[in-house]
């Protein structure tokens, strides 16, 4: 076989989406998570991180990590996509603790961890009509007998039972407060997204931390949200282990037997 031309290109960095470590208890405590080593760090002080972008009114900039910052972790199994957020926020404002997934303020209308995602292979089922992707909102809610945070005024509430879900219909969601912010976690059924997970599959995923403070314009900081479309989001690979991706894909154009042809090969490796 005569090779007429060959080109090698470096593919963008991919993040591993590893399996959940045993049974996941959705209680907001994050005991099952290794948050200290979560690669998704959202810190406004990290000005050299190209994945971070501020979405603010010029009159109300982010005032440092104590104002709004956090870490996010993700995991998966055959049934659920898991998300955990550990957020630092100096003033908390959120949804009612017993809100259903289609009740109360939108995720960008209260303190929350937002996840935008879609499938590399085939589009997922959207959970609301305001986004071309799946937009999940893990909203803060004032918890316990003496919560530090407050409820968002009803004027910001958006209820649309059959149309707009902040998380998907059958998701599990839980929140706990911390001295400097809150923790939130959720289990989102793959079936709600119309998706069957398989090792080696790729997902586009980006994150946002909205920050709602009294009498101030909304400010947000995004991780991976800087592009113009979903395909600009960071790529996550469903993997079964941390030391190998283990995928080789080969494709070729269908051409006549006497014509030139092109073969494309993709090899994923951590190094």
Image: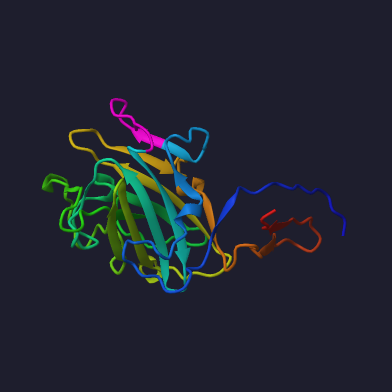
Outermost residue toward the right in this view: 2
Q: Is residue 242 magenta?
A: no
Image quadrant containing the N terminus: bottom right
The image position of residue 85, as x and y in percent, is 38, 54
211 horizontally vs 159: left or right: right
Q: Is residue 98 visible?
A: yes
Residue at (20, 53) in percent of width and height: 142
The answer to which of 31 and 2 lies nearer the viewer is 31
Considering only vertical position in the picture, is 187 above or below 236? below
96 horizontally vs 115: left or right: left
Where is residue 16, by image quadrant? bottom right
Magenta stretch in the rendered image: 54-65
The image position of residue 267, as x and y in percent, is 69, 58
The answer to which of 60 and 148 lies nearer the viewer is 148
172 horizontally vs 260: left or right: left
Q: Is residue 64 magenta?
A: yes
55 horizontally vs 231: left or right: left
Residue at (52, 33) in percent of width and height: 48
Q: Is residue 132 visible?
A: no
């Amino acid at each position: 076989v005569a090779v007429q031309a060959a080109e090698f290109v470096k593919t963008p960095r991919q993040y591993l989406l590893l399996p959940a470590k045993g049974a996941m208890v959705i209680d907001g405590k994050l005991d099952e998570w290794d948050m200290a080593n979560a690669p998704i760090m959202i810190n406004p002080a990290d000005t050299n991180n190209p994945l971070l972008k501020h979405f603010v009114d010029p009159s109300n900039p982010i005032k440092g990590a104590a104002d709004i910052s956090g870490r996010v972790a993700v995991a998966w199994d055959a049934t659920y996509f898991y998300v955990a957020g550990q957020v630092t926020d100096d003033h908390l404002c959120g949804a009612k603790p017993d809100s259903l997934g289609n009740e109360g303020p939108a995720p960008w209308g209260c303190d929350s961890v937002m996840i935008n995602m879609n499938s590399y292979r085939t589009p997922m089922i959207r959970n609301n009509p305001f986004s071309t992707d799946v937009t999940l909102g893990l909203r803060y809610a004032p918890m316990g007998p003496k919560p530090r945070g407050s409820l968002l005024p009803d004027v910001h509430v958006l209820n649309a039972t059959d149309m707009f879900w902040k998380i998907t219909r059958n998701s599990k969601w839980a929140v706990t407060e911390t001295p400097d912010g809150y923790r939130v976690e959720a289990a989102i059924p793959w079936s709600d997204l119309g998706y069957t997970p398989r090792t080696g599959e790729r997902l586009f995923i980006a994150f946002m931390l909205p920050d709602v403070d009294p009498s101030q314009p909304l400010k947000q900081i995004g991780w991976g949200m800087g592009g113009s479309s979903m395909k600009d989001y960071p790529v996550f690979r469903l993997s079964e282990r941390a030391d190998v991706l283990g995928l080789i894909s080969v494709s070729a154009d269908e051409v006549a037997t006497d014509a030139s042809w092109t073969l494309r090969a993709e090899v994923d490796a951590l190094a």
